[in-house]
Image (spheres, grey):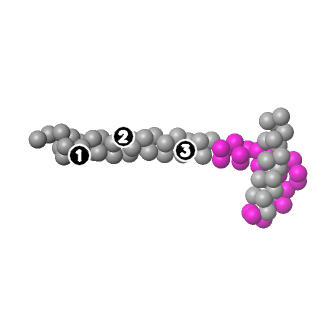
Amino acid sequence: MAFFYLMIIGAAAGFLATRVMRLETDVPTTVAIGVFGALIGGGVLRLLVWALGTVAGFVGAFLGALALIWVWKTYLRK
């Protein structure tokens, strides 16, 4: 089922991409462009989400540490 889903999405994406780029191609080439574009774009998107997720985790840890230091200096250390 995933294969057919990839083919349908690939055909739609390939169709839109070839129209936006004003490229005249046949149906198999259009589908191939969409499928390989989905694989490349999906990989890049997953890499960005992973990288941004790692950065977001670091920023969250840093802000949490700052908050803990503030609470410690303000309320606990007297």
Question: Circle 2 sits on which residue?
Answer: 61
Residue farthest to the right?
27
**How would you rate the neighbour count of disc 2 (Cα within 10 Å): few for under 14, some for 14-19, many for 20 or more?**
few
| Res 70 label | 1
Q: Amino acid at mark 3?
A: Val
Residue 9, given in percent of the width and then of the height, sits at 79, 47
Q: Which of marks 2 and 3 precedes in the sequence? A: 3
Q: Residue at x 44, y 45 (%)?
A: 56
Residue 10, given in percent of the width and then of the height, sits at 79, 47
Question: Circle 3 sits on which residue?
Answer: 49
Residue farthest to the left?
78
Q: Amino acid at mark 1?
A: Trp
Q: Residue at x 78, y 59 (%)?
A: 16
Magenta stretch, residue numbers? 20-42
Marks 1 and 3, Cα distance to the nearest angstrom? 31 Å
Q: Secondary structure at mark 1?
A: helix
Q: Amino acid at mark 2?
A: Ala
**How would you rate the neighbour count of disc 3 (Cα within 10 Å): few for under 14, some for 14-19, many for 20 or more?**
few
Q: Is residue 26 magenta?
A: yes
Residue 72, given in percent of the width and then of the height, sits at 21, 40
Marks 3 and 2, Cα distance to the nearest angstrom? 18 Å
**How would you rate the neighbour count of disc 1 (Cα within 10 Å): few for under 14, some for 14-19, many for 20 or more?**
few
| Res 53 label | none
